[in-house]
Image: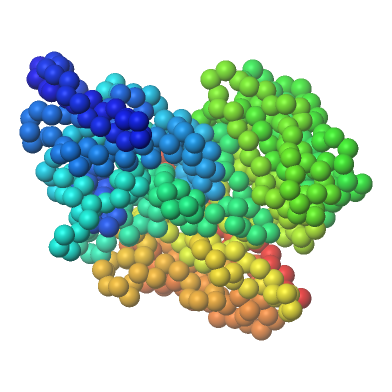
Amino acid sequence: MTKTTRMTAHRDSAGAFRATRRGGTWRMALLATLAGGCYGPGGEAEEADVEVSALNGTVNFVLSPASMRCSSPEVELIGQAMNIAQRQVLGSQRPAMYQCLEGAVFSPAEDAIVEEIITRLSQNMPTTISCEDFDGNASTSSTTSERFRFSHRFLKDDFSDAPNAPPPTAARVASVMLHEIAHTKGYSHFWGYEGAEGVTDHRASTEYAYSVPEQVERCSTSLSDGTARPNGQRRSAMRGEVELQPVGGGNGLPFEALCPADRGAVYGISVATTPGEVSTLSLFCRASLSGAEGAVGGPLGPGTAVRRDCPPGQVVVGVAGAMSMTNVGSLSPLCADDARVRANLSYTAQATPPPVSVNGMHAFTRQCPQGMVMRGVYGRTDNLSLDQIRVVCQQPGLSALPAAFPMLPMGTGPTDVVRRDFCTDQGAMTGLHGLFTAQRISRFGGICRGLARDTTSQRWTIRSTEDHVTPGRGVFSGEGYAFNEQWTAATADDQRYRCPTGQVLVGVAVRLGAVGEVASLAGQCASVDAWNSAAASPLSFTTVFGRSVATSSLDVVRTCPRRHYLAGLETARGTSSTITGVTRVTPFCRWFPNP
């Protein structure tokens, strides 16, 4: 038992935090280390500034020993930050935080469900705060009494080397707090090694900026500055088509159910349910209100299917229902006036019938951006229940591109978990991201750019937008070198994981290891115009990612047909008892026809 003296924070009439002494409370210190902290100068990745475990609940500042005491200015700054953070996840800005996260892409994406993220961030638990001198590693702690541990240096000047630098803003402190809270709630990210010396650096991993803690921090900061946007391209900013946030989680095998190009809009769905879960999903597609109908089927499971059509004159613009972290519990179409949607006018969407709540599950709504209709879903199923769906939306009347199709798989190693992901924004891959070790590729995903037709020539061009990524898939481990660093720390290597300007990926090549696992990986790049022309176009390999850097060692090559670009990847990982890395890669190609 150790004696601790605390001052308890409360708000005055102006809403600011003040501190008053509360004496001699006896308390057992119960701290269980869960995850590493991750901040330093100017947001750079150094294990330093804050140890966090809570947001909601009673806030206690430790007064004794003196080495853990926060000064009055520090208490005031932390209190202001707590006000901001609480407002963002519990108060008036909670809907804006939800909307920001809903527009984000997450990687790693396992269990990254917006409703669950918000719920975990706002859990009501008492919080104890201390301010200490530490400059190296920091860890987050979580028990029934949660813990914030701040660095004096961070609160003094945000690790600035400039003389008389001001302290960080309350908004900065709030965003750091929420980042660290996300860690204690089970969300992690990858750092990656930089160069041959193996120094960890968050910039070495493309996934870092797309992780839940980083996206939470970015949304917090942007809410404070009025922009309300995550890292990377927002889903709502994507043109032509967009894939919405996942619904559900779980495992299962991947599937697609997309309306064909000539019947590109959903006007009704059919679902079968067993207690607490959806087991079957089918979509009814038409080109217009009066067009011929066709169905695309999802998974087949037990139960009797019930058809749910939109009312006359309406089209499906999303879905609503209930979900858990393992499956979809109920599902209803969101319907809106067809004419208003096609005219890109505002509308009010209604679930038909009203969504069914399921005890213990999150209620959800996934609605297409204005001017888009639902074209279909990507998903996962175990053939007994619907584990996950990701709604795909598209502009009506757009020349719908055909769905991507698979090339032959590469790799014969034992498989455990299979994931399939696609570029959205009518996009194609222009790079690859991930981590590798001396033996194999441990995880990887795609870097995508949206494509658009030139208004005059009608030829496809690469849009000048931010990247979006397909989530990294493979082993959930922070170990390994990042693709962009290869084996050296030279600045010139930083872009070696992308195609040159004006080029897209049109193929993938691998070298297989001893038991058929993916030991090396490279991409084939080609000029958009050249690949879509009749003349032959030479292919170039991007940097080879893995143990071998000689292109001659790549013994399995899959190249998309002419006028097709790499638009998706299916990745299988090995089991922990065999190969703990990527054991199979299947590239998906998509046709981008030019006139």
**Quarter-of-image position of residue 16:** top left
In the rendered view of the protein, which quadrant contains the C terminus?
Answer: bottom right
- Residue occupying the far bottom of the picture: 535
Residue 294 is left or right of residue 375, and the answer is right
Q: How is the image coloured?
A: rainbow
Q: Position of residue 246 (x, y in %)?
A: 57, 40
| Residue 407 in the image: above or below residue 300 | below
Residue ID at (38%, 47%): 217
Instruction: State whether residue 477 is above or below residue 439.
Output: above
Can I make out residue 488 in this image? Answer: yes
Q: Residue at x 55, y 27 (%)?
A: 362
Identity of the residue drawn at 35% across and 35% down: 14
Which is nearer the eye, 106 or 162? 162
Kindly indicate the quadrant of the structure image that contains residue 294: top right
Closer to the camera, 351 or 220? 220
Q: How many marks?
A: 0
Q: Position of residue 502 (x, y in %)?
A: 55, 76
What residue sits 54% from the left and 66% below the top? 465
Q: Is residue 421 left or right of residue 184?
A: right
Give the quadrant of the N terminus. top left
In x, y percent, where is residue 78?
Answer: 27, 39
Compared across the picture, whether 139 is left or right of 377 comes to: left
Q: Looking at the image, which is closer to me, 396 or 571?
A: 396
User: Is residue 379 toward the left or the right of residue 189 in the image?
Assistant: right
Q: Residue furthest left?
A: 66
Residue 290 x/y as whole percent? 92, 46
Res. 120 visible in picture: no
